[in-house]
Image (tube, coloured by chain):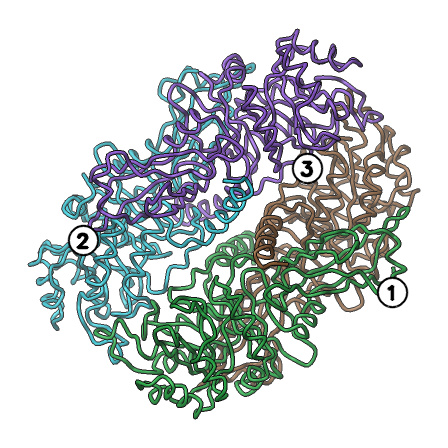
Chain colours: A cyan, B purple, C green, D brown
Amino acid sequence: MPLKRIALVALLLLGLSATQAQVRHEINFPDLPGYRTLKCDLHMHTVFSDGYVWPTVRVDEAWREGLDVIAITDHIEYQPYKNDIPTKHGRANEIAAGRARERDLLSVLGAEITRATPPGHYNAIFLSDVNPLDTEDFYEVVRQAAEQDAFVFWNHPGWKGPELGRWGEYQETLFERGQLHGIEICNGESYYAEAHQEALKRNLTLIGNSDIHDPALDHARTPANHRTVTLVFAKEKTLAALREALFARRTAVWSQNRLFGRQEHLAAMFQACVEVQPPHHRSGDKLWLAIKNHCELDIELQAIGDTKPATINLPAHSTSLLRLDASVLGKREGLPYRALNFLVGPDEALPVTLEIPSP
Amino acid sequence: MPLKRIALVALLLLGLSATQAQVRHEINFPDLPGYRTLKCDLHMHTVFSDGYVWPTVRVDEAWREGLDVIAITDHIEYQPYKNDIPTKHGRANEIAAGRARERDLLSVLGAEITRATPPGHYNAIFLSDVNPLDTEDFYEVVRQAAEQDAFVFWNHPGWKGPELGRWGEYQETLFERGQLHGIEICNGESYYAEAHQEALKRNLTLIGNSDIHDPALDHARTPANHRTVTLVFAKEKTLAALREALFARRTAVWSQNRLFGRQEHLAAMFQACVEVQPPHHRSGDKLWLAIKNHCELDIELQAIGDTKPATINLPAHSTSLLRLDASVLGKREGLPYRALNFLVGPDEALPVTLEIPSP
Amino acid sequence: MPLKRIALVALLLLGLSATQAQVRHEINFPDLPGYRTLKCDLHMHTVFSDGYVWPTVRVDEAWREGLDVIAITDHIEYQPYKNDIPTKHGRANEIAAGRARERDLLSVLGAEITRATPPGHYNAIFLSDVNPLDTEDFYEVVRQAAEQDAFVFWNHPGWKGPELGRWGEYQETLFERGQLHGIEICNGESYYAEAHQEALKRNLTLIGNSDIHDPALDHARTPANHRTVTLVFAKEKTLAALREALFARRTAVWSQNRLFGRQEHLAAMFQACVEVQPPHHRSGDKLWLAIKNHCELDIELQAIGDTKPATINLPAHSTSLLRLDASVLGKREGLPYRALNFLVGPDEALPVTLEIPSP
Amino acid sequence: MPLKRIALVALLLLGLSATQAQVRHEINFPDLPGYRTLKCDLHMHTVFSDGYVWPTVRVDEAWREGLDVIAITDHIEYQPYKNDIPTKHGRANEIAAGRARERDLLSVLGAEITRATPPGHYNAIFLSDVNPLDTEDFYEVVRQAAEQDAFVFWNHPGWKGPELGRWGEYQETLFERGQLHGIEICNGESYYAEAHQEALKRNLTLIGNSDIHDPALDHARTPANHRTVTLVFAKEKTLAALREALFARRTAVWSQNRLFGRQEHLAAMFQACVEVQPPHHRSGDKLWLAIKNHCELDIELQAIGDTKPATINLPAHSTSLLRLDASVLGKREGLPYRALNFLVGPDEALPVTLEIPSP
């Protein structure tokens, strides 16, 4: 093959790579010891309720954006286009299923129970049939979901209504009956601190989703601008393992450059994301070393006590350079920081320790 | 810490990550079995000859852009600013050295021998002292470099002059004396096919460099738009190992979405970069599988024979989806392609085999 | 208001501007003398035929991307989702109409006549009722469109079929009857040179459209990567003026960094886009001047005869610097070039003259 | 010319436009009635003091980034590289001058008077000879500048020192002698609120500069990430007009998505940047209209009183859509807002009125 042709081909390639819609960019949050980190969006809509896209679009978007699991959760009680698209519960998931298999996505049958506030909106996922949930009494709907062994979570609790997401009689009743398993503490760009607190207090699963109605605009992902997702720490990538992990509360929520989760999971994730390299240079009483951040967060560390430096920024997917006092080499216990965007509670940043390897 | 403060901190972070100059983006070409892949730019200039930056700038740029090795190679015979900056051979390297150590870069003392064409320009690196090379007779200069055990390569052979880079008496003489070890087949955005052929014929080391004079503009790196570098496959990241690998011709050149090298190195690199995953879905006589491309190239594959599909594009750092005939599962020998931007000769693309793992 | 709050607000703004979907980026092609340049996409689909979005999405996308006119043209004979969405001709346009008015977009009722090749596909726009066109005989369909005074154009002529877009008996018959008014010479990223030639020969209107089925991905627009549109040079922004201009063949097609049109329109457009500034500096026999390119094209000029420089690149929305021989000041007739991406025929670049203003 | 060649040329162009360093992106702040808006950076360094680039680099950067005026202001008393580059006051400006003329930039001879704090650092520009300023006594230096009719401003007042930028005896003395004419209220990403207040109180010129030492990294300009500059409202683009405008205090400072200035200039600038279009649609008691923002700021408006909507965001270079109560049409006095990033004082946002044109 003559060189000119190769050069042209190379040029064409460049064009292609800019426009080729069907390329997947993995979401870089590493697996945890013993668990695979599944990236899940468990709340999205299509033209079968009040969304703006055909169901297969949700699969294509999810694949491109690096998701492993989706649940299309069209409203049971609300279909504003029903004069044009007659109500068919679960139909969106049925249409999406084949395309999801082709793209190696797990697709979970779900539905959104849609009531005034209170009680508000709830997603039921892992359903086998949505139709029995299309009934008038709220408690009866959730009971039907429970009968199908569904995983049920309270959606966008601080969205609206007189209580603005305050835990009330409805939630208490479902909780006591064992029919409420999680809370969506992040929905798109919203974060509900009070609900977060409630989820920790009641030991419910932490969930974060996009609740996307429009098409995904496919901007380049940045730490600041990304789809809100639930990271599920599952034994493998199967529906059964996903289900087990959700009920076992092994999740974290990634939203707007923050990761919300339980201490054990966030600590393991921090460990897996941040790689402190041995000092490569010493001059006088100063040491130089590099830290690699392998994940999607721009991580900010704030010193505990008088540790120096007072703050460390670790931009996503990058290597940062650190100059330290040589005295740190003697500190067996490492350098204590708080990871300001690893949040184990509404007001509580994860404590971490940077261990400096021997040169 | 109250939540609002955390949110603000997170926002500030985003701003920081956009502007923070001192962040390193690694160049993703994996190591080869037994070798570490060092990213090297062995040709660059500073204000000590005709470049436009102070020497430490070359270190900062190289670190940010993911390089492991630099050689500042200011012209021996050409200092257009010498009325303002008196000639001091090797001074740029001296100024850069401390900063290079702080950033864990190997910095090699080099110089550019700068003559009319022919004989043209040559870089000598691994020098111990540039001054003896500042002498009139061309052959004597190179002899002085040889005496210091320097590695010498012919720069931008097709740049200009009556011969336009044709191998001639000067090159032949140096070659016979064992004083010419490599050829710069890529210089910035230029590629010299004839010189590439010559390097293969004479068994010389393949080299590619930026020859940067201006400041590096620090655009986001893309497959099409990146610094031209030499990948050196060295036993470890030390000057001695770098030297051994260069003399042993274990290199490849990355320039404008192409990788030039010898078959053994490019084949190993392709193997390390391209990960074919087991088919995840079968429907009728069709299979679906994902291929991950872990490197910086947008890779284009062209079928050998009647293999289907006829072409496969694997964008850099991405996962691509492939639909294949199920019959490929029976083919033990895999699917034969040519990797159009892995070039083992000026007109010769690397033959590769995609092995399809069992589902 | 305290400063800190202002600073925070400013920061928040930055975030907003990155994610705010509902911002419009105007398409910068200036008006021509006597005419307003309307940016039109006259071929697009929704879930009411085989598109993937709800009709209002087409309005939102068009507004964001700087369009002035859209025609939703769902297939008359092809509704693959009709088991879920029963056929309702013209319904998509009806749903989109209110939102289009809110966004100041002209929305034209259209439909795509969808037959095997030949005769192929045709868009009829400015319809009052799509239903009469849902009939078996091809000629009868077009007659019905004609009866409604529709503007009819042949879609993607080189798409497929035995003739691959060759002008044949069907086209000839419609043409003789005065029922065929334009040809889509560009459809998405495809360009049909033969159809372009045919349109010029028969004096038909030049049309270019997206034929979008998927959601628009809303990447940043670049000269290389943009929606294919028809520029219509209309007396004002009204449906009547749009119709008059289309029948009067006052159009150009913008596709992949090229503008296709008739000489009079492209010449006027070039004049309106390219602003040569007076020389600002002279040194010896050299002059320096700036050229501003106010449009979306990266313009490339190639010298006619021995004009210097041999090529001039004028990147979109930018100012370029030119160094010329001072002798050009004496040339009353200006410097002759061809504008390589202003195409007045399949093989014919627009001749232009750069007039150098007096300093 | 055959089509394929044209297509290839078009493709090549796209590549070029991405990498071509020497393209200028104008800074879009419109002229004010009677004045031309000059974009000026009056504080920058080269290798002739402690900067990292050769002087011509400052010209190339400035031209690419849309500046009209630069002042290279190397330190008089501080040349850390003087063992390699012997002190030559004013030499950087001399080297840059020819290249500035070729690029139509005004280049002003300046120098930075560099003392411990207090008195701190001061720039003197419009000098004819820097050498007389190289003298020990601080007051004598400024007197020498005054003798050359220089324009003198206090640099980065809050930078460091015991007073942290507090107006003190030195400033008072210079001010009383008429030898201090402006204050740098923004330096790079820093803003000095106290100095801003002082400048207003003493009626001094507001100045903002980059104080760049490193090479400019040439990232794509965004509202958040841009060079800090002084906008000077001059009668024409000449050194004399620039000087007149600086002494007449007709300036504004653009830094990090904020514009700082005097009320009359900011009000005129807001008027010139923001174009409210007539309502294009009315439905019930609602009106729709578009607002164009022609400048580089993401503008945020906050309602005064109970005006609706409470906030309006106008992203840079974009058209925004507004839905208003139809009652606004009756309001002759327009809608009162504060432009939060047009700052007429440290704590004071510019009051503006949106006049709604008749439909």
Kindly indicate whether the residue at mark 2 contacts the one at mark 1 (C-beta within 8 angstroms). Answer: no
> CA–CA distance between discs 1 and 2?
72 Å
Quadrant assignment for the C terminus of chain B: top left
Q: Mark 3 against mark 1, which lies toward the viewer?
A: 1
Observer able to see residue A108 = yes
Residue C81 screen position, x and y as percent: 25, 71
Q: Would you say residue D335 is visible in this rendering?
A: no
The residue mark sitting in front, 3 or 2, is: 2
- Dot 2 corresponds to which residue? B284
Q: Which residue lies furthest to the bottom in this view?
A: C147
Category of crowding for the residue at label 3, using alpha-carbon neighbours closer than 10 angstroms: few (below 14), some (14–19), many (at least 20) = some
Q: Nearer the viewer, residue D226 or C214?
A: C214
The chain identifier of the residue carrying mark 3 reads D
Amino acid type at circle 3 is: Glu
**Disc 3 and disc 1 on one polypeptide chain:** no
* SS under mark 3: loop
Q: What element carries label 2?
A: loop
- Say what amino acid the circle numbered 1 marks: Arg
Q: Mark 3 points at which residue?
A: D163
- The residue carrying mark 1 is C332
Residue A337: percent from left, percent from top: 40, 31
